[in-house]
Amino acid sequence: MKRKHKTYKLKKSLGLLETTFYGVGIILGAGIYAILGHGAGVAQGGLWISFIIAAIIGSFTGLTYAELASRYPKDAAEFNYTKKAFNRKYLAFIVAWIMIFVGIVSAATVSLGFAGYFAVLFGTPVVLVAVALILLLSLLSWIGIKESAKFNILSTLIEMGGLVIVVLIGISIAGSDGISTDVLKMPETGFAGILAAVGLIFFAYIGFEDMANMAEEVKNPKKTIPKALVISITITTILYILVSIFAVSSVGWETLSKSDAPLTTIAEKGLGQNGIVLMSVIALFATANTVLIILIVVSRILYGLSCQGVLSKTCKVVGKRGTPHFSILLVCIVTIGFALIGNIKTVASLTDVGIFIVYIAINISLIKIRLSEKKASKKHFRSPVNIGRFPLLALFGLLSAGFMLFYFEPLFLAGAITIIAVGFCVYKVFNR
């Protein structure tokens, strides 16, 4: 007589608060720490306007995800959306494959960033610390989604607190050294400069899509995920606008544009050496939190693909703690492999290309699904601004994502095509 093995399922542990914090945590990430200076160099005093425009453009695709997550609350979100739209498993797999690549390379890159900050404070070897971080956060992910959520909430609050501190410092020293505080003054580059900066700043909003890949652990995901998406983008936008206004008013756009760590530059001006240490510690939490969320999300994509029968069945095995432990282990090993390479900046640049390709696919998917409907359903969240069944915001999201691809050199676009080709080969291996 065969012994029956008890089967476990993912636990629905995340409410609106936890899901929103995951969204805010992944959007804030480490992006604002690097992108602010580059944006200031282009938009100058109009930087805050660039953030508003970027938020509006980001919300186009964000609302597309909100509707699709409400319609199909499943892990491996991009696979499910594309499959529902086109009924082509190989096409859906390739979109999910891009998300897997983007996630793993991003996690490895950010873990090396964490190790860099850690080395500045404690003089430790970078690669070794990066590997240790991936192992520890994978263990936390394995222990449980609720435990991971607690760490995420703490880290996100620290990240937000860091930005609030920058704003308060900016308020206290605004206008010092003769720096202009006229935030309504048009930059020397005119409105064209503000628009040009939008292309750079848009990267600070990437990450909201990851929330959809945690749907099976969210309570009432059809309502919770759309709400969390909208709240997350709103919170981060408010923080970004405040930071950009007082950053420019406190040290000037010229200083920001020349700084590799613009927020640290502001903190140093207000708090001296203590400001540098403070921002370094906050950056540790920001980078660690980003790695944790990505590791969780990619493991859930593998889990979802396995449930759909396009990956090995072992990836959908859930342990008694309610987490897909084999998928977590696999993501951990591959991420460590990339981290061991050390310098993967060139490969990391491909992740931005990949994410915009995914945005294009997802917006097209919603348009296709909407046009295939005989009548509009009222059972789920519906993206606003429509002409009949046609979702105008999805079209705007599609066009904006396509436009962003023009920012990349042909080499990176060729690299993205290579990744797609590898994904197709992987699909064929598991689906012969």
Image: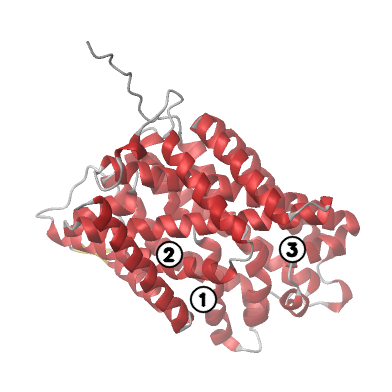
Q: Which mark is residue 315?
A: none
* Residue type highlighted by circle 2: Ile
Circle 3 Cα neighbour tier, 10 Å, few/some/many (<14 / 14–19 / ≥20): many
Q: Residue 273 in the image: x percent, y percent?
A: 90, 58
* Residue type highlighted by circle 3: Leu
Q: Are marks 2 and 3 in contact (CB under 8 Å)?
A: no
Query: Total of numbered circles in the picture?
Result: 3
Q: Residue furthest front?
A: 1
Query: Which corner quadrant of the image does residue 149 belong to?
Result: top right
* Residue type highlighted by circle 1: Gly
Q: CA distance from mark 3 to mark 1?
A: 20 Å
Q: Of the two numbered discs 3 and 1 on the same chain, state the one appearing first in sequence.
A: 1
Q: Of the two numbered discs 2 and 1 on the same chain, state the one appearing first in sequence.
A: 1
Location of residue 42 with respect to 26 vertically, above or below: below
Circle 2 Cα neighbour tier, 10 Å, few/some/many (<14 / 14–19 / ≥20): many
Q: Residue at x 45, y 46 (%)?
A: 297
Q: Which mark is residue 355?
A: 2
Q: Which mark is residue 199?
A: 1
Pointer 3: what residue?
Answer: 263
